[in-house]
Image: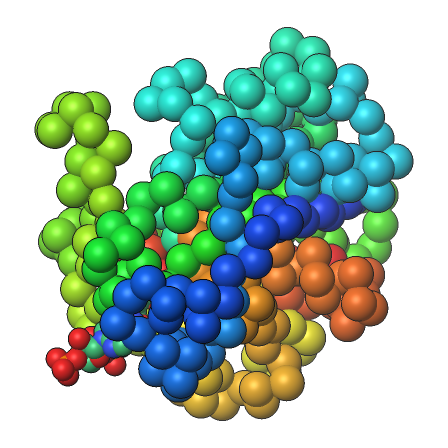
Amino acid sequence: MSVATPWRAVIRGWGGYVPERVVTNDELARDMDTSDDWIRSRTGIRQRHVAAPGEFTSDLAVAAARPALARAGLTAADVDLIVCATSTPDHTFPATATAVQRKLGCPVGIAFDLQAVCAGFPYALTVADQFLRLGQARTALVIGAETFSRLMDWSDRGTSVLFGDGAGALVLAAEPATAEPAPRGVLASHLAADGRHYDDLYVDGGPSTTGTTGHLRMNGQEVYRHAVAALAASVTEVLRRAGLTLDEVAWIAPHQANKRILDAVAKRLGVAAERVLVTVDRHANTSAASIPLALDLAAADGRLRRGDLVVATAMGGGFTWGAVALRW
Ligand code: UT7
């Protein structure tokens, strides 16, 4: 699956950012017919962070990228590739990645957005890794950044309680493939999409259809059903491609949509709940940002250590899904 090249990509730094403003379930229940009890029991969500007026996806991305670069011991001047996974760009174009490039002061390089909704981070990691392996870039910022609060129809209690805003970033750097005995960074990936489910999770606006931004619409039960099967199958497939077993995996880092989905995936895989990173309780669903935010928290509190084998997996609109096996 991975072609041998003279380069490989190693994770050098990580960072995360959530907006200051926290919105609790009780706060939502003041304005809509819902309750903390319903939201917690159906989703595990206790609260979400919401971007301030004038705070854009690129601002969240930059706030996550800065600590990631600092941890890597690098500066903006070193970055020659920015891949920003987002479905909530600052503008229809140009890419939010170029806004990040400008705000950080990165030199001329490659910068683009990648749109695979909640599966954006596995897609972005895979794409960035391949640029680095092929020698087309040396230092990559791989970012998941979203302001999903701006896509909510606040009169729809079935969707508006589920999402939040945030951003996470990894710094990947190319190094000679022989530098260390144990490969680190991305070991294997599995990506998939099935456009037959286009209408099950989508935004009912866009530049080419309505000319408006639109609001998120979802067939929740179909998403749920597909998510459990797809995530578990993708983890199994990526491990097969990497030549690894689940026993060797320290952490499963799933996209954070719903605690019940996380529990069902862990059960299907036969993985203990303690090995699954969970942030949905405090962040809700931050789409492409949820995996790097979960990695950031686990690395910051010492659970995730250098050398740990991690499988990140996600599923989102399209449907798109996938998994990446990586060594931290
Ligand atoms: O990245 C992927 C993003 N999407 C997802 O992860 C979503 C996956 N799906 C889910 O997590 C679940 O389907 C939901 C959490 C969205 C919904 O849970 P559910 O158990 O499938 O509930 P439901 O849609 O069948 O609704 C059950 C009831 C309905 O009332 P009636 O018709 O039984 O009277 C809904 O109107 O719950 C009602 N309901 C609510 N009640 C209070 C729906 N939303 C709410 C709410 N508060 N926020």
Q: Is residue 174 visible?
A: no
Comparing 238 with 290, the one in front is 290
Q: Is 306 left, or right, of 320 in this rendering? A: right
Q: Quadrant of the C terminus?
A: bottom right
Farthest residue toward the right?
Answer: 73
**Up/down of 173 relative to 298, above or below:** above
* Occupied quadrant, residue 143: top right
Q: Is 286 left, or right, of 319 in this rendering? A: right
Find residue 231 and report its horizontal and vertical position in percent.
39, 69
The residue sitting at 32% across, 44% down in the picture is 151
The residue sitting at 71% across, 15% down in the picture is 105
Comparing 126 with 26, the one in front is 26
**Up/down of 101 relative to 286, above or below:** above
Comparing 94 with 129, the one in front is 94
The residue sitting at 13% across, 52% down in the picture is 199
**Up/down of 296 relative to 235, above or below:** above
State ligand 1's quadrant. bottom left
Find residue 146 and report its horizontal and vertical position in percent.
47, 43
Find residue 47 and report its horizontal and vertical position in percent.
51, 67
* Occupied quadrant, residue 197: bottom left
Q: Is residue 310 visible?
A: yes
